[in-house]
Image (tube, rainbow, N blue to C red):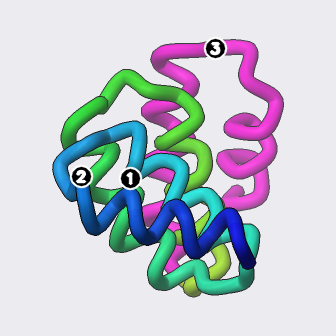
Amino acid sequence: PRALSLARGLLGAFPESPACQFYAGTLELAAGDPAAAARILERAAQGQPRNVPIRLNLAVAYLKTGRPAQAQEQARAVLELDPNNGQAKAIVGAGR
């Protein structure tokens, strides 16, 4: 919880920072709040659309909030950037 608190503080201080968005979103996801994670990671993905970890975490957040089509979209985008990404392949494969 301390790391999440710090990340939230940094995000408040630097709301447009993709790095702060990534860390805050990732920690929200790890803390069990995928809806908050998705909101934050969506902004991060807009700022850094070629960032694989952001898009993967966003895909997981979408899965955990019951949005499989959006998760698949993010996973396919990851595979365009990293064709051998096992996590993205698993997400895409789960939707078939």
Q: Which mark is residue 21?
A: 1
| CA separation in Å, label 1 and label 2 | 9 Å
User: What residue did someone put label 3 on?
Assistant: 83
The x, y position of residue 8, in whole percent, is: 45, 70
Question: In the rendered structure, which disc, 3 or 1, sits on the residue that comes first in sequence?
Answer: 1
Quarter occupied by the C terminus: bottom right
Q: Quadrant of residue 28?
A: bottom right
Q: Nearer the viewer, residue 19 or 74?
A: 19
What amino acid is at disc 3?
A: Pro
Q: Nearer the viewer, residue 7 or 75?
A: 7
In the image, residue 32 lies in the stretch drawn in magenta: no
| Residue drawn at (49%, 41%) of the image | 54
What amino acid is at disc 2?
A: Phe
In the image, residue 70 lies in the stretch drawn in magenta: yes
| CA separation in Å, label 3 and label 1 | 25 Å
Considering the numbered disc 2 on the image, is that residue within a helix, a strand or a loop?
Answer: loop
The x, y position of residue 19, in whole percent, is: 41, 38
What amino acid is at disc 1?
A: Gln
| Residue drawn at (41%, 68%) of the image | 9
Please say if the residues under marks 2 and 3 sit with CB atoms less than 8 Å apart. no
| Residue drawn at (21%, 57%) of the image | 15
The x, y position of residue 76, in whole percent, is: 50, 36
User: What residue did someone put label 2 on?
Assistant: 14
Q: Is residue 60 left or right of residue 20?
A: right
Q: Which residues are magenta?
A: 67-96
The x, y position of residue 86, in whole percent, is: 82, 29
| Residue drawn at (60%, 14%) of the image | 82
Answer few, some or many: residues within 10 Å of disc 1's Cα (few below 14, many 20 plus, some between 14 and 19). Answer: many
